[in-house]
Image (cartoon, rainbow, N blue to C red):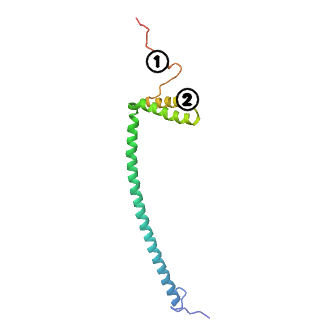
Amino acid sequence: MTDQVTPDSSPASPKKTSNDTLLLQSIKQIVKVTNAGLASFEEATDESSTMFVSRLLELAKQGRYIATRAATTYERRGQYGPQIVAGSAAVVGGVVALRTGRIPGALAASVTGAAAYGNVYGYEDYSATSWRNSLPNITKKE
């Protein structure tokens, strides 16, 4: 016995029932709602990220201005050398003296003053023989 295939009963095109059309319509509706939700989420995310980036750019601009001013002020630190050295020594020495006593405070003040002096005016080469370079040449060549 051979099976006869009719256009309505072929395996490639099954009959659509009302349940199938209801399922397809439900899937289409779910896809539509999901796409709308994703679109609104993307729009909200895009808006907030644009706002964040604009705020970040403004902060970077202000930070660059502050860094430039700080670098300029740091380069002019030699104009205020004595105030910087004395102020650093007094503040650090005072805090240490209040917490641990006068002798550690005086030691901390002197170390801090020396470090501040070196930072303001620069450190020289203080090797064991560096003092010879600062002596005047008194030998006469005839």
What is the three-letter code of the residue carrying label 1? Asn
Q: Residues within 10 Å of mark 2 (few under 14, many from 20)?
A: some
Toward the viewer: 107 or 32?
A: 107
The residue under the point 51% across, 92% down is 8
Q: Which mark is residue 78?
A: none
Specify the amino acid type for callout 2: Leu
**Residue 134, image x, y percentages:** 45, 17
Quadrant containing the C terminus in the rendered view = top left
Label 2 secondary element: helix
Quick check: 80 left or right of 11? Answer: left
N-terminal of the pair, mark 1 or mark 2, is 2
Residue identifier under label 1: 133
Residue at 50% over, 86% down: 22
Quarter holding the N terminus is bottom right
Residue 42 position within the rendered picture, expressed as x and y whole percent measured from the top left: 44, 67
Circle 2 sits on which residue? 107
Residue 109 screen position, x and y as percent = 52, 31
Q: Which of the 4 quarters of the picture holds residue 65? A: top left
Q: Is residue 15 visible?
A: no
